[in-house]
Amino acid sequence: MRFRVRTLNSISPRGLERLPRERYQLGDAVDRPDAILVRSADMHALDIPASVIAVGRAGAGTNNIPVSLLTQRGVPVFTAPGANANAVKELVLAGLFLGARHIGPALDFVRSLELEGDALDAAVESGKKRFIGHELPGRTLGVVGLGAIGVEVANAAHLLGMHVLGYDPQITVQRAWQLSSGVEQALSLEDLFARSHAVTVHVPLTDGTRGLVGAKRLALMPEGGPVLNFARAAIVDEPAIVAALDAGRLGAYVCDFPSPVTRGVAGVVALPHLGASTSEAEENCAMMVVDTLRDFLEHGNIRHSVNFPEAALSRVPATSRIAIANANVPNMVGQISTRLADAGLNIADLLNKSKGEVAYTLVDIDGKVPAGLVERIASIQGVLGARAV
Ligand SMILES: NC(=O)c1ccc[n+]([C@@H]2O[C@H](COP(=O)([O-])OP(=O)(O)OC[C@H]3O[C@@H](n4cnc5c(N)ncnc54)[C@H](O)[C@@H]3O)[C@@H](O)[C@H]2O)c1
């Protein structure tokens, strides 16, 4: 048994089955765990054992985890960013159709028909004229934020035949690779709003994105289009949305955030925060975080950590690896290299990355890690943790 993993919540079996039982001991009562897997359990009050070298959260946020404390201990916290992207994308696509075909008000109309027979048929035929919609091909969708979700939405809308404009000044190289070449880059948010029949937002809520969809930008949109918000309520200025709907300039506001401001307003379709609510999204989160945790435990590689830098090296035969978490201060790599040189070891590969106050070093050496070396490295002032992997 090499690794011991304590689960604080029930984690999807599809995730846990990716930890082979011959190498992993798993369960909620595992003592001296190497790692903790958690979903929503509050870890702030928990006495986290000193044996823990990693925490994996099967989800996106980390409010329930004492991240700074773990950072000081050199413990990376892993999450599953984007694991729910497909779930949100599907609901956004549903929102596009809801807006284009007036499905919300049409359902309300049908519910109001307490008629039968010919009277019902007549009411349906005369009432349906109010709900003439439009098809998506040829229309322009503006996608604000091209991260995990935005890229999926943009690509899917492009496949539906829409012209897609995207805007994200900080798009990552990985997302740019995933984005369909058919998606056009908007020059600015104003450019995007002015040219989009429908706008959907997929940015995090920050000081910079609060109220991003406001009166001025809504006024730029061609008349009648919907705004979709499956990101966070406050990214949209709700009073401005209500005013635009009342004035008939906006066709619909489809969102995942019921609010007293928009409640009962004609044209608002509010869902009860269903974006990531699929059984698959929960499984995807568990599978993703288990894979990253396993790669860290077995190879020292770090991906998708909220407090440590991305750091991954492929393994080379006949080498062994030392993984070191250290304070991001000068001369750490120099001191680590000196310890290796003192032991007469040749460095086959070395990676050092930093993020904020911490840095992480992977050193591959020819041959085996000699006894006592890890302890000598761990004793360097500023090293938070070191291990042979
Ligand atoms: N409705 C739901 O249930 C649900 C589920 C998951 C996520 N979300 C929300 O969706 C948001 C996006 O999720 P994600 O996984 O795609 O996140 P992500 O971090 O992968 O992508 C966010 C993108 O927004 C971009 N961005 C930030 N500020 C911007 C700005 N001012 N203009 C344009 N682009 C900007 C970033 O560069 C990044 O590429 C999350 O922050 C979360 O609030 C909602």
Image: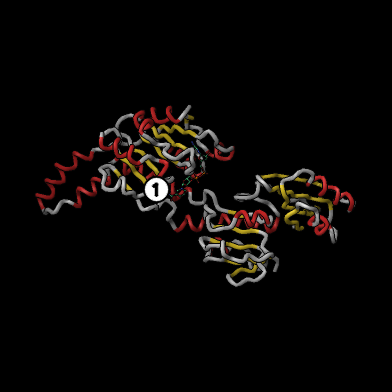
Q: Is residue 238 left or right of residue 48?
A: left
Question: Badge 1: few (under 14), some or many (20 or more) residues near its Cα, within 10 Å?
Answer: many
Q: Provide the residue designation for mark 1.
A: 91
In depth, the one of 227 and 319 nearer the eye is 227
Is residue 220 visible in the rendered image? The answer is yes
Q: Secondary structure at mark 1?
A: helix
Q: Is residue 38 left or right of residue 219?
A: right
Image quadrant occupied by the N terminus: bottom right
Residue drawn at the location 42% of the way across and 50% of the way down = 275
**Residue 299, image x, y percentages:** 70, 55
In depth, the one of 142 and 383 nearer the eye is 383
Task: Say if disc 1 is inside 8 Å of ligand 1.
Answer: yes
Q: Amino acid at mark 1?
A: Leu
Image quadrant occupied by the C terminus: bottom right
Q: Is residue 270 above or below residue 41?
A: above
In depth, the one of 27 and 216 nearer the eye is 216
Q: Is residue 33 above or below residue 348?
A: below
Residue drawn at the location 78% of the way across and 47% of the way down = 332
Residue drawn at the location 42% of the way across and 30% of the way down = 192
Q: Is residue 245 above or below residue 280?
A: above
Is residue 139 visible in the rendered image? The answer is no
Q: Is residue 148 left or right of residue 122?
A: right
**Residue 232, image x, y percentages:** 43, 46
